[in-house]
Amino acid sequence: MAAQENHDSVVRYLLAHGANQSLANEDGFTPLAVALQAFNSSFLRAARAGNLEKVLDYLRGSIDVNISNINGLNALHLASKEGHAHVVTELLKRGANVNAATNKGNTSLHIASLGGQEEVVKILVENGANVN
């Protein structure tokens, strides 16, 4: 529960006092798996919100720039949808896959185009997005 809610200090306390790290929750996930999912979700939320400072903080760490959620949406998809050109540019500089597709087969270019995000469309095409 503490890992799921991003209560890092509580997680550290529990681990320091012998909490069983291999116990799984009702869905079969260990505390580490839950904490990683929460961490990844926070990164994706920062990209969607256009919070470049937070996105950069995550990227300075060990997060995979192409990590995606259960629907296959990654940070580039989410930033593209919202028109956050500054975040899109930085994600591409950091190795985001410009042609990665969601579970439904949509790329960042599809998503930005459907959303009318002209500046983002231009950035994606200039960075090798497949236009076909």
Image (tube, helix red, strand yellow):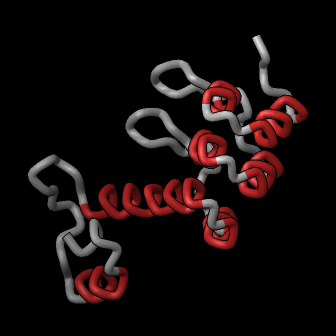
Tally the numbered discs.
0
Which residue sits furthest front?
116
User: In which quarter of the view is residue 19 placed?
Assistant: bottom left
Residue 31 to residue 7: above or below: above
Asked whether 111 or 2 is in front, the reply is 111
Asked whether 88 or 91 is in front, the reply is 88
Q: Residue at x 71, y 43 (%)?
A: 96
Asked whether 126 or 40 is in front, the reply is 126
Q: Is residue 45 left or right of residue 29?
A: right
Q: Position of residue 10 (x, y in %)?
A: 27, 85
Q: Residue at x 84, y 39 (%)?
A: 123
Q: Quadrant of the N terminus?
A: bottom left
User: In which quarter of the view is residue 9 placed?
Assistant: bottom left
Q: Is residue 16 left or right of residue 65?
A: left
Q: Is residue 9 left or right of residue 100?
A: left
Q: Position of residue 72 (x, y in %)?
A: 47, 33
Q: Quadrant of the C terminus?
A: top right
Asked whether 71 or 13 is in front, the reply is 71
Q: Residue at x 46, y 24 (%)?
A: 103
Q: Position of residue 27 (x, y in %)?
A: 15, 47
Residue 103 to residue 83: above or below: above
Q: Residue at x 68, y 72 (%)?
A: 53
Which residue sits furthest right?
126
Residue 5 to residue 36: above or below: below
Which residue sits furthest left?
26
Q: Position of residue 119 (x, y in %)?
A: 81, 42
